[in-house]
Image: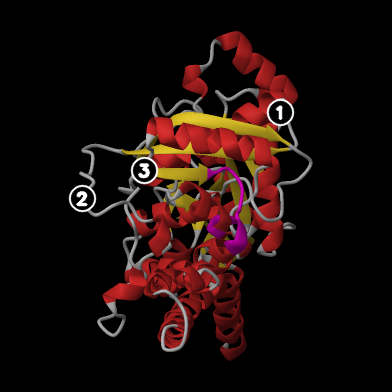
């Protein structure tokens, strides 16, 4: 897992861009291995069985996405991790033996580590230690593409690392202590922290400017009669594949977590009606709060939507899918989207035999079963999206005099499902239209009638 610099600001000295403590660094003469980094996983869990397996599998997938492979796993079952060392004394000794035997590039904790726990582990292991949040931040840093996304990732990294700055200058302890040795380290630490605070303030200002521009665009969309549909779901459930299948967009669909960070919005035509379809960042169990905050612009696409398509992996076991659905619900609640109507979309049904698809239909009778790969079920999903669009429209049923052909052109420009019939008074037209457009046509007809 590559080390991420805090950013590319030339005012930030290279020295403070190390994430880990000097004491935990590898010897200078150690030759770097080729290929992915080797990770030793540790976990302090209060759960066992399927949930334990699922959490460890998810961490392994996160590490794989970040560019590391798991070589060994050490689990301790406790109600909560030890406040100081994360693991108990016995497990910590066992961990030290595993580190000596395997010589991993890093030790990865399944949960979140406090700065104190991370320092204590690195002191005892003399090996780089990261937690789940750091791994996710690393993945986000790899996948951010837009200028806004890169700013968001950098800010989240700095906020996470700020409390861990005190360990970066511990190598000054080698001076031996005493008068003249404590001060330089302390002043350097404060200098580093001041630079980090200044950089965070700059990033927040730049992100506020970007947010104002995005808010202007969002207000235009909200004011439009075109319904807004947001794709949400656990990461790797196939949201981006579904986005591509419905809209023809070219969104990355690699088999890795968090492929989509930047919001993608496309116009999609469903049975003659247009909808705005937006992809969002993938959700995950216990998504770090600073990432929910940092990517609020992306997640607001869900908060402002008329309908959320909750995309789930139909090929997963029911218990895992339910657990991941709860994680999605927690994030939607955190961003204020809990009350937005949702439609469950069970993707990847092409991986299921017919009897399992039938069982899914019984358990989730209102869900849409689709396959973004084979396009199975997409017609039904598009029909449901068209119904959402229809509910935002009003019925226009008027007779337009033949002399006012411009109004007929307006009906065809703004309306859908238009039918017309010639009468003695003019053309009787029936259409579904945005309320504002229908009101303008009725007003024009009334004014024309008043003039005689």
Tell me if residue 282 can be seen: yes
Question: Does residue 415 sit above or below 98 in this rendering?
Answer: below
From the top left corner, tell me how far across and down residue 269 is, in percent. 43, 49
Residue that label 3 marks: 105
Left or right of 100? Residue 363 is right
Q: Which residues are magenta?
A: 109-119
Residue 364's tag is 1
**SS category of the residue bearing label 2:** loop
Does the magenta run of residues contain 135? no
Left or right of 274? Residue 366 is right
Q: Nearer the viewer, residue 409 or 226?
A: 226
Tell me if residue 424 can be seen: no
Q: Of the two numbered discs 2 and 3 on the same chain, state the one appearing first in sequence.
A: 2
Residue that label 2 marks: 29
From the top left corner, tell me how far across and down residue 15 is, in percent. 31, 74
Q: Residues within 10 Å of mark 3 (few under 14, many from 20)?
A: many
Residue 195's tag is none
């Amino acid at each position: 897992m590559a080390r991420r610099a805090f950013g590319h600001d030339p005012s930030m000295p290279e020295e403070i861009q190390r994430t880990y403590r000097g004491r935990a660094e590898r010897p200078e003469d150690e030759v770097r291995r080729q290929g992915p980094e080797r990770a030793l996983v540790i976990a302090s869990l209060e759960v066992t069985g399927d949930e334990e397996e699922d959490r460890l599998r998810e961490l392994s997938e996160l590490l794989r996405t970040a560019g590391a492979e798991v070589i060994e796993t050490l689990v301790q079952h406790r109600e909560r991790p030890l406040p100081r060392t994360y693991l108990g004394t016995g497990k910590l000794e066992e961990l030290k033996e595993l580190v000596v035997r395997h010589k991993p590039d890093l030790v990865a904790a399944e949960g979140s580590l406090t700065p104190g726990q991370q320092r204590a582990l690195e002191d005892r292991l003399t090996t780089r230690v990261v937690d789940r949040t750091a791994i996710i931040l690393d993945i986000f840093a790899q996948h951010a593409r837009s200028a806004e996304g890169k700013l968001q990732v950098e800010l989240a990294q700095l906020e996470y690392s700020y409390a861990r700055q005190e360990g970066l200058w511990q190598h000054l302890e080698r001076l031996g202590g005493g008068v003249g040795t404590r001060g330089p380290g302390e002043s350097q630490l404060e200098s580093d922290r001041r630079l980090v605070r200044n950089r965070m303030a700059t990033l927040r200002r730049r992100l506020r400017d970007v947010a104002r521009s995005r808010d202007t665009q969002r207000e235009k969309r909200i004011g439009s009669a075109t319904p807004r549909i947001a794709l949400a779901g656990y990461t790797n459930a196939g949201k981006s594949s579904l986005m591509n299948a419905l809209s023809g967009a070219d969104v990355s669909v690699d088999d890795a977590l968090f492929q989509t960070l930047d919001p993608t919005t496309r116009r999609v035509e469903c049975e003659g009606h247009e909808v705005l379809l937006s992809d969002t960042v993938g959700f995950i169990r216990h998504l770090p709060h600073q990432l929910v905050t940092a990517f609020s612009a992306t997640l607001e696409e869900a908060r402002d939507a008329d309908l959320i398509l909750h995309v789930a992996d139909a090929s997963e076991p029911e218990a895992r899918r339910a657990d991941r659905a709860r994680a999605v619900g927690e994030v939607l609640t955190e961003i204020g989207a809990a009350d937005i109507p949702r439609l469950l979309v069970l993707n990847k049904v092409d991986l299921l035999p017919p009897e399992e698809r039938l069982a899914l239909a019984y358990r989730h009778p209102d869900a849409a079963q689709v396959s973004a790969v084979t396009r199975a079920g997409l017609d039904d999903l598009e029909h449901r999206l068209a119904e959402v669009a229809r509910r935002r429209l009003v019925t226009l049923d008027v007779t337009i005099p033949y002399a006012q052909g411009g109004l007929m052109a307006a009906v065809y420009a703004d309306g859908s499902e238009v039918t017309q019939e010639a009468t003695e008074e003019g053309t009787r037209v029936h259409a579904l239209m945005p309320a504002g457009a229908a009101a303008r046509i009725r007003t024009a007809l009334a004014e024309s009638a008043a003039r005689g």
